Image (cartoon, rainbow, N blue to C red):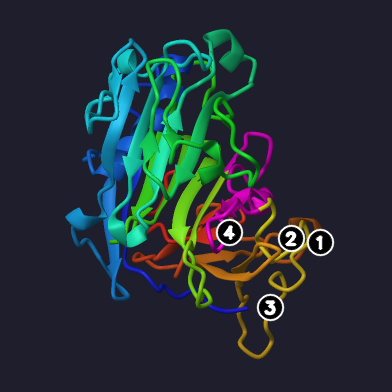
Amino acid sequence: MTTPTLSNDWYSRGNIPYPNTTTLMDQFRCWPWLLKALLKGEVSTGTTASVVSGVVGNTTRPAGSYWTCEGSCDGNGNWGLDGVDRWTSSYDATKLIGDADGADHSWIVLKSPAALGPVYLCIDWCRLDTEALLLSGNGGHLTLVFSYSAFTGGSATTRPVGGGATSNEWEPSGAAVTVGNVETVYETVPGYQTFYAHFTITPAGAFHFATNRIPTNVFLSHFFCTKAAETQTGDNYPVWIGFHSSIGSSRGGGTVALRSRVSARTYDNTSYTPPGMLVNNFGSVSEFISLKDVLALKWRLQPLYLYDQSAWRGRLPDMYAVPNDSGSGRVTLQVGSCYPATTAPTHHVVGDYLVPFGVPPKL
């Protein structure tokens, strides 16, 4: 157990209003578009903050942290792995089309800065999400798949594949990847709503991305990609990803359930890691971190160590498990609360984790 420290510089942009929330489809479309636009540095709304060498301020995000576009499809038959972002730098609903694999639909491939790997991310809207389905509470559906190899192939109806084979890829659930697999993203609610996105990134391109709707006092989703710290010699593929989205929890997205949705490639990139790679099994009763340390007179936080059943893989940097044990009367940290509890925070609580967001979220 420990107190929060930062091993990276972080540049945050928070409370970013969704560009269009008038329909359920637009509410959902904003999620992939904002993720893409934030990674590329195309968003100027919201509030910014930074923590550089431990100093809280408002230093501009370095250009070297920007992800770049490898290619895209706009769902209207226009596609190519040619460096063109057909989703465009301004939100355009006509460029964001979801449909089943084999039918015209939107996808995009992004490349991280070299310092992160590089790694490649494909966002693929390969499910026919309709207003009726979103209204029923099923959520929207996106593929969020990574690869250390550049994506190849693809068409207007099928996403490209990392290194030409899905066996080169990995996704948050820690399972075998197939073209057409999806993550469920819970974003929608009937009627006009106020949604916000929250984003933080390192100079190397590691990031956290979260969303919320007010006034629910929780986050709807939490998605991250980061390089593990304290890895062993020979661990040449240390990039880890995680994703969790929920509307059925009092803690929202990014809860303890995230532990089974954190994954990577194996240390030698021969396969994907199985699910449940966060070693800390703090469960619903956080015995170790829900009791005050009588010597330090404070509650400690729990680092997030990684093990893939073949090797110790280090820990997730700058991210900690927080006390959450309301059922027993012990301490519970409110979602959105900050550390330190001042006007210049370095972390905020997302679900059951303390994450390096520097901008206090409007929840």
Q: Quadrant of residue 58?
A: bottom left
Which secondary structure dominates the residues rendered in magenta? Answer: loop
**First-in-chain label (3 vs 4):** 4
**First-in-chain label (4 vs 1):** 4
Instruction: Find numbered disc 2 in the image and state the secondary structure of the residue it sits on.
Output: loop
Q: Which residue is mark 1?
A: 328
Q: Of residues 251 and 313, which is closer to you in this image?
A: 313
Q: Of residues 123 and 199, which is closer to you in this image?
A: 123
Q: Residue at x 60, y 72 (%)?
A: 301
Q: Is residue 219 visible?
A: no
Q: Which mark is residue 325?
A: 2
Where 323 falls versus 105 (above or below)?
below
Q: CA distance from mark 3 to mark 4?
A: 37 Å
**First-in-chain label (4 vs 2):** 4
Q: Position of residue 297 (x, y in %)?
A: 62, 84
Viewer-side label of 3, 4 = 4
Q: Are marks 1 and 2 in contact (CB under 8 Å)?
A: yes
Viewer-side label of 4, 1 = 4
**What amino acid does circle 4 point to?**
Thr
Q: Which mark is residue 292?
A: 3
| Magenta residues (range) | 244-273
Q: CA distance from mark 1 to mark 3?
A: 14 Å
Q: Residue at x 37, y 58 (%)?
A: 117
**What amino acid does circle 3 point to?**
Lys
Q: Position of residue 8 (x, y in %)?
A: 36, 69
Asked if the magenta segment contains residue 301, the reply would be no
Instruction: Find numbered disc 4 in the image and state the secondary structure of the residue it sits on.
Output: loop
